[in-house]
Image (cartoon, rainbow, N blue to C red):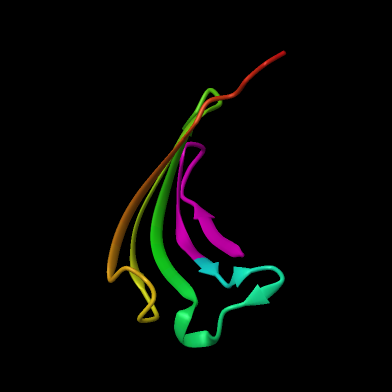
Amino acid sequence: MNFKVAREINDEWALGFEHYAGFGRLNKMSNSSQQDHVFYFVTDFERKGFGVNFGAGCGLTNASDQWVAKTIISIPLKW
């Protein structure tokens, strides 16, 4: 499960926060100490459909990595 809250700065840039959570398998959820929770500060850039999302995050539980950097590149596919 994840969620994102962002504020657009202009037509191309946005700043925000994201939270990613790993609860384990659907048929057997992990107990809270074994769940992965990471909170990110993110920036988004989008121009002509091409987008880049970059985030720096920190783990909130012992099961999470202490520090994490992530990048998501989006390219539109037009059929």
Residue closer to the observer: 78 or 66: 66
Horizontally, residue 51 falls left or right of residue 67, namely right
In the rendered view, tell whether residue 64 sits above or below residue 40.
below
Q: Position of residue 75 (x, y in %)?
A: 53, 25
* Residue 74 on the magenta span: no
Residue at 52% across, 57% down: 7
Horizontally, residue 77 falls left or right of residue 46, namely right
In the rendered view, tell whether residue 45 sits above or below residue 76.
below
Q: Position of residue 69 (x, y in %)?
A: 31, 54
Residue at 34% across, 64% down: 57
* Residue 18 on the magenta span: yes
Horizontally, residue 62 falls left or right of residue 23, namely left
Residue at 39% across, 81% down: 61
In the rendered view, tell whether residue 44 sits above or below residue 25.
above
The quarter of the picture where residue 56 lies is bottom left
Outermost left residue = 67
Q: Position of residue 10 (x, y in %)?
A: 48, 43
Q: Position of residue 45 (x, y in %)?
A: 43, 38
In the rendered view, tell whether residue 11 sits above or below residue 33.
above
Residues drawn in magenta: 1-19
Magenta stretch, main secondary structure class: strand
Question: Which image quarter is the C terminus in?
Answer: top right
Question: Which image quarter is the N terminus in?
Answer: bottom right
Outermost front residue = 28
Residue at 42% across, 69% down: 39
